[in-house]
Image: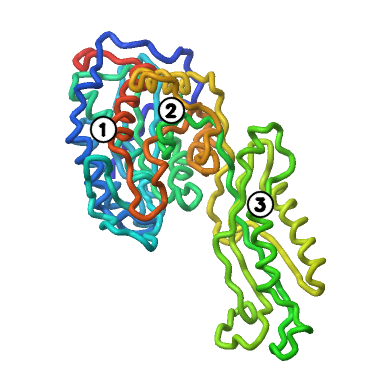
């Protein structure tokens, strides 16, 4: 385990007087990108099964640490919980520019029904790279490591530190990034590379996961008229919850990121869910869902709005008892707050300029759909650490679906954009100059 303490850890944002940029005394050439090597890096990452809370998370983190060390970066594993590790690397600058952090997660969603390719095969065709987690978000993670590799190969050195963070447990509320921040890791600016189809996401929702419990009254089906059917009540409730927006939004943009979804429903007899007795009317349902809210709203206000909907269902089903609570009370895991960045911030402008240079057109920027409904570690970086940042990454349109994939041009263009963003924010010089 390395004892590296990156210089960026010792300085909170805003403690140095500087303007981002500093420019570059040399011309970096994004057209010299080794595309075959960049694609090989991504497929190597896809072939490691790093589903949440599996050994593959830390196996992948270990592989990335070794790769960063081979480049000459200060790199280490950081233990999040026993046997579970983030990978953190620092490309040391000359000390003359602001620092920039790239952030992404290594854990992936479960495999769903409907796949026609090997989820861990790393299949590449003329259009896409396929694999579980390639969109969410191994392509994002690979893109910033590939950008650093490309700059080093061109003899470039940053003036400010470039901090590469690869975290576990983002799909559990960001446990890896929270642990990283608690240890003191910081930079002046950040780019979180969640999949936005290369758009600059400057507003996304906060996420509060909730559990609703419905308690009815059971009877045999022969006396169904005397029962209070918890499953029937749930069938009424789910579409109402899914259609909700929430009170207190400060603007139309804030209201636009409101959304709720019930993702788990289970009903049977009693809290023990006795499923062997279908002739009886179910008297208990538990459903789990998530609500997405804006910076001007709070988890408490969201749950108050949900409670009002529950009171309405109780009136329709006399004798029904309905309750709601935050799932974080059971899991102890963090929740994603809402994220908002100024479109005029230096890092947003830098990413906008990089997109324009690579693609020759203005970059979509703002509360972009559908990614404005994401929760992301950008919110922890901004809220907990006070860092100035933006969310921008490859992938998105084929995210969290069977045969998950990423467009090759998007992945490669993202690498080029990161190269340019490093030049703008950190400044660059020739590698042999100190």
Q: Are marks 2 and 1 in contact (CB under 8 Å)?
A: no
Which residue is label 2 attached to? 187
Which residue is label 3 attached to? 243
Q: Residue at x 30, y 15 (%)?
A: 428
Asked whether 389 or 365 is in front, the reply is 365
User: Callout 1: 10 Å neighbours few (<14), some, many (20+)?
Assistant: many
| Vertical placement of residue 274 versus 256, above or below | below
Which residue is label 1 attached to? 146
**Label 2: which secondary element:** loop
The quarter in which the N terminus is drawn is top left
| Vertical placement of residue 27 versus 388, above or below | above
Q: Residue at x 73, y 76 (%)?
A: 216
- Type of colouring: rainbow
Mark with earlier residue (3, 2): 2
Q: Quadrant of residue 271?
A: bottom right
Answer with left or right where residue 142 lies relative to residue 400: left
Q: Residue at x 23, y 54 (%)?
A: 121
| Vertical placement of residue 425 versus 166, above or below | above
Mark with earlier residue (2, 1): 1
The quarter in which the C terminus is drawn is top left
- Nearest-to-viewer mark from 1 and 3: 3
CA separation in Å, label 3 and label 2: 39 Å
Q: Residue at x 64, y 72 (%)?
A: 285
**Residue 387 spot, x, y in % from top left:** 50, 29
Asked whether 32 or 384 is in front, the reply is 32
Q: Are marks 1 and 3 in contact (CB under 8 Å)?
A: no
Residue 157's label in the rendered image is none
CA separation in Å, label 1 and label 3: 41 Å
**Residue 63 spot, x, y in % from top left:** 24, 46
- Nearest-to-viewer mark from 2 and 1: 1
Answer with left or right where residue 213 lies relative to residue 391: right
User: Callout 2: 10 Å neighbours few (<14), some, many (20+)?
Assistant: many
């Amino acid at each position: 385990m390395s004892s590296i303490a990156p210089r960026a850890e010792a300085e909170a944002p805003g403690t140095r007087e500087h303007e981002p940029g500093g420019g570059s005394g040399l011309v970096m050439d994004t057209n010299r990108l080794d595309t075959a090597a960049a694609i090989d890096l991504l497929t190597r990452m896809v072939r490691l099964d790093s589903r949440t809370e599996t050994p593959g998370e830390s196996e992948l983190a270990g592989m990335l640490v070794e790769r960063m060390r081979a480049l000459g970066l200060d790199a280490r594993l950081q233990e999040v919980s026993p046997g579970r590790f983030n990978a953190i690397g620092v490309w040391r600058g000359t000390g003359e520019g602001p620092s920039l952090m790239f952030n992404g997660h290594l854990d992936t969603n479960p495999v769903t029904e409907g796949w026609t390719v090997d989820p861990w095969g790393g299949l590449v065709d003329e259009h896409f790279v396929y694999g579980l987690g390639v969109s969410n978000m191994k392509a994002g993670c690979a893109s910033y490591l590939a950008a650093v590799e490309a700059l080093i190969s061109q003899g470039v050195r940053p003036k400010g530190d470039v901090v590469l963070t690869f975290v576990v447990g983002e799909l559990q509320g960001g446990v890896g990034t929270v642990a990283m921040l608690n240890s003191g890791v910081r930079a002046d600016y950040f780019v979180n590379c969640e999949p936005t189809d290369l758009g600059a996401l400057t507003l996304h929702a906060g996420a509060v996961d909730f559990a609703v419990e419905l308690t009815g009254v059971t009877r045999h089906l022969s006396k169904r008229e005397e029962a209070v059917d918890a499953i029937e009540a749930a069938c009424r409730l789910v579409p109402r919850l899914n259609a909700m927006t929430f009170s207190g939004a400060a603007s139309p943009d804030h209201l636009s990121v409101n959304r709720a979804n019930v993702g788990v429903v289970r009903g049977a007899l009693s809290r023990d869910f006795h499923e062997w007795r279908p002739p009886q009317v179910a008297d208990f349902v538990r459903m789990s869902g998530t609500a997405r809210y804006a910076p001007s709203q709070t988890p408490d206000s969201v749950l108050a709005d949900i409670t009002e909907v529950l009171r309405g269902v109780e009136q329709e089903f006399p004798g029904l008892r309905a309750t709601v609570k935050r799932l974080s009370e059971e899991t102890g895991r963090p929740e994603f707050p809402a994220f908002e960045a100024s479109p005029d911030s230096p890092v947003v402008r830098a990413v906008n300029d990089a997109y324009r240079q690579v693609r020759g057109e203005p970059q979509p920027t703002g509360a972009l759909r559908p990614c404005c409904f994401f929760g992301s570690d950008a919110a922890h970086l901004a809220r907990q650490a006070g860092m100035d940042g933006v969310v921008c990454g490859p992938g998105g349109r084929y995210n969290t679906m069977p045969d998950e994939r990423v467009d090759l041009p998007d992945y490669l263009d993202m690498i080029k954009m990161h190269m340019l963003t490093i030049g703008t924010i950190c400044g660059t010089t020739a590698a042999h100059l100190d």
